[in-house]
Image (cartoon, rainbow, N blue to C red):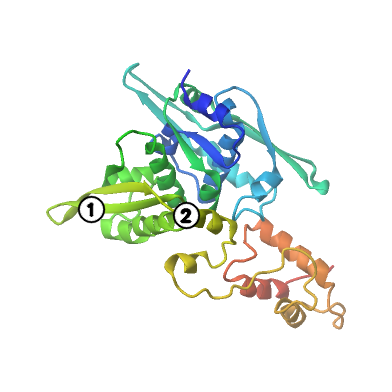
Amino acid sequence: MGKTTQVAADRAYDQTKTVLPAEVAQGVYMQHAPSLAALKLMHLMIGTAGGRMADDVRHEFRLSAIKKIDGMDNHTRKSIVPLFQELAAAVLTVDDPVKMTTTIGGLMDGARIDYRHEVSGDVMVTWYFGRTFREMAAESNHWAILDRQAVFHLGSKYSVLLFQHIASLQNLKHVTSKRFTVPDLRAMFGMSDGKFSRFADLNKHIIKPVIAEINSDITRLHLTVTYHKVGRTVAEVEISWEVKEDLTKVKDEQDRPKVGRKARRDGTTETPVTVFPAFGSVKDTQPWDRIARDNAPRIDGRHVPDLRVLADTFRKWCGEKSIPLDTASIEKTFTTWCKSYSAR
């Protein structure tokens, strides 16, 4: 039995951290890397299982636990189905040169969403981890201890993948950097062939934004990138890391709303963002009251529809479509939606 599950069991009291097997954290064992939302869900599942992640037992949490994750508060029992489908499709490939075996299997064996009591807001989610994952976790002797809120606050799946990979290397003595070949880096990001095939595009659209996000006040790590060339071609990307001296800024940023986070990270002036109300009516709440009155069809051609019902219906629709209520285009989305709204 490996040490990873014991470390996870010993840290069961700490709900701010997730212990992840290094084999999973480093990503090199996983094909078909899930989306950002599915990755966050995976972290919640592994964190919930803790020291029992290698056990052949049923794990569970409520939908409300998912809705507490940054950016996932609008999810419904219908909208989480595709996320579990992604996790079910993730393939783990483990090669053991000592035993001279290669094992291919899944992260998850099955999940069930019980919505019998959905009316009261009680939706239960249960799942079993796949045999390959359980065996990997049971035999793992290397792990990553991740700040759960940092993972939940990251806004790119590539940021999560690199953050968890680097976190898995922090426990190694005298190791403060790692060199990636460009193919290795693409594999770690789970990129398909042909996507950002030119290094200049990969660097511009993935590497630099990911480094900037991890270096922001969301995480405790500061990364530095060095490019190693053969002639004019970048052959390797070296990433070194250190823990930031002042972690109070990290906690403060994680406690702040994500609205304006990019502006804070870039050091630019924050532009006020319009957010649709999370509850209640939009009556006398601008600009939503005005938009609804100007665009929603009148009842019998005369009466404005009930603005509380209209607002509740819009919020439900956004949840089903996974549209955040603070998305930059929420005002335009609400305007278009109102035009086709039917109060009947």
Q: Is residue 292 left or right of residue 152?
A: right
| Mark 2 crowdedness (10 Å alpha carbons): few <14, some 14-19, many ≥20 | some
Q: Which residue is mark 1?
A: 227
- Which residue is depicted at the point 67% across and 44% down? 65
Query: Tag on residue 99?
Result: none
- Which residue is depicted at the point 64% across and 58% down? 321
Q: Position of residue 168 (x, y in %)?
A: 41, 37
Q: Is residue 220 left or right of residue 185?
A: right
Judging depth in this view, the residue of 161 and 211 nearest the camera is 211
Q: Is residue 130 left or right of residue 311?
A: left
Q: Position of residue 100 (x, y in %)?
A: 33, 18
Q: Is residue 47 above or below residue 233?
A: above
Which tag, 1 or 2, sits closer to the chain's start?
Answer: 2
Judging depth in this view, the residue of 129 and 215 nearest the camera is 215
Q: Position of residue 259 (x, y in %)?
A: 57, 66
Q: Residue furthest left?
A: 231
Q: Position of residue 119 (x, y in %)?
A: 82, 48
**Residue type for callout 1:** Tyr
Q: Is residue 121 left or right of residue 239?
A: right
Q: Which residue is mark 2?
A: 156
**Residue type for callout 2:** Ser
Q: Is residue 338 above or below residue 232?
A: below
Q: CA distance from mark 1 to mark 2?
A: 22 Å
- Which residue is depicted at the point 61% across and 39% down? 15
The answer to whether any part of residue 338 appears in the image is: yes
| Mark 1 crowdedness (10 Å alpha carbons): few <14, some 14-19, many ≥20 | few
Quarter of the image for the C terminus: give it. bottom right
Quadrant position of residue 27 = top left
